[in-house]
Amino acid sequence: MADIQPLRALHYDLERTGGLQDVLAPPYDVIDETERARLEARSPYNAVRIDLPVGEDRYRAAARTLAAWRAEGVVVQDREPAVWPLEQTYVGPDGGERTRRGFLARVRVEDYGPGRIRPHERTHPAPKEDRLELMRATRMNLSPIFSLFSDPEAGVWRGLEPATTGAPWAQATDDGGTVTRLWRADDADAIAAVHRTLGSAELLIADGHHRYETARTYADEVGGEGPQRYTLMCLVALEDPGLTVFPTHRLLRGVRPDQHETLATAIRRDFEIQELPDTAQLAPGAEGGVRFGYIDSHFQRPFMLTLKDPAIADAALRGHAEPYRRLDTAVFEALILRGALQMTDGDIDHLSGLRYARDFDEALRLVQTREWDAAFFMAPPPMEQVQAVAAAGEHMPPKSTYFYPKVPTGLVFNPLE
């Protein structure tokens, strides 16, 4: 079972920063150079300065910045441990408004396994190296890992809800309109509700696999018992009505002339091809088997590709569990990337001619402007499918899921010493 504990959080002094509005940042892996500069300009204390440092000596620079903030009292550490109830009200990519509820806590780092902590996606090596260097320098969890647990009776939130009846400790609205509200709960009843309900919980990592695996490496490096054995998590119930998952689409570039014909042959062989009346229909629904929307930069005609027979996926993904063989991202990787285009693990890991796009309109634009050669549009994976793949001990291909909204960096930090 996962070991979930309250934490003596390091957090911003809201009087020094004027609240959280100007100091929060998205997770590091969705920030480009333009966004980073904009966040830095918002506040000298924006979390991007320590979570996504730049320059040759960037990791030590992050550590020096964090140390200066602590010395100045910009960030302070709680004397008593607490859990932090969290609400995020948002409008999703589908246009629906929802509120997702969860809480921040620290969770003991351990090996993946049934009944404890499960991953659902494969990771890339480069981000783990980056996050490890940052953790070594700062000795801090700077951003929370987003994980899921089963709580059909909503026992955890019922136990935390009394702490949320008053005004939140802090509130912030991001550029996309997501409103994040955060409370601090240090009373014994709230903490007991977490332990009572999650005493035998298994956690499924939804977002932050690289950070979790980095935390595990760091804990083993330091050795022994202590704060280094725990990592910061945002925990949300699988049954929470505000929990949503959206697709991440695939873009290809640098396809050689000979590969164009190989790709076309593979598509004609393995998929039923239906031309669509307009590009708006390129996004597949969650039902209907394995299928992708497809458009290329040359003809710019939209198609829906539907796998002719599950046996094709069974043959291409022999040795994998049945839930994995029904994933559109796994079938795409096997038949298109590895099969038709002969891409290697290294090509996929290092995004050689491959790009992921969460935004449908952006992916379409990149093909229509001929910046990328082709786009494959994925369906949103049902949460039951994500659970089934993880329960089978399988890891989805990278970027198979897009849990929205992201949990911002800067809500609280978790000291590792």
Image (tube, rainbow, N blue to C red):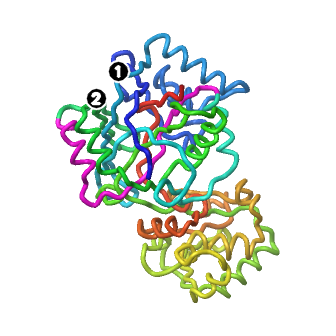
- Start-end of magenta stretch: 137-165
Q: Is residue 140 magenta?
A: yes
Left or right: residue 76 versus residue 140 is left
Taking 22 as reference, is 128 above or below it? below
The residue labelled by disc 2 is 169
- Crowd class of label 1 (few under 14; some 14 to 19; many from 20; radius 10 Å): some
Q: Nearer the viewer, residue 163 or 217?
A: 217
Taking 337 as reference, is 208 above or below it? above
Asked if labels 1 and 2 touch by Cβ distance under 8 angstroms, the answer is yes
The residue labelled by disc 1 is 14
Q: Element under label 2? A: loop
Is tag 2's residue or tag 1's residue first in the polypeptide sequence?
A: 1
Left or right: residue 18 versus residue 251 is left
Q: Is residue 285 magenta?
A: no
The quadrant in which residue 325 appears is bottom right
Taking 263 as reference, is 196 above or below it? above
Q: Residue 61's x, y, as percent?
A: 64, 21
Q: Residue 36's x, y, as percent?
A: 56, 33
Q: Nearer the viewer, residue 229 or 206?
A: 229
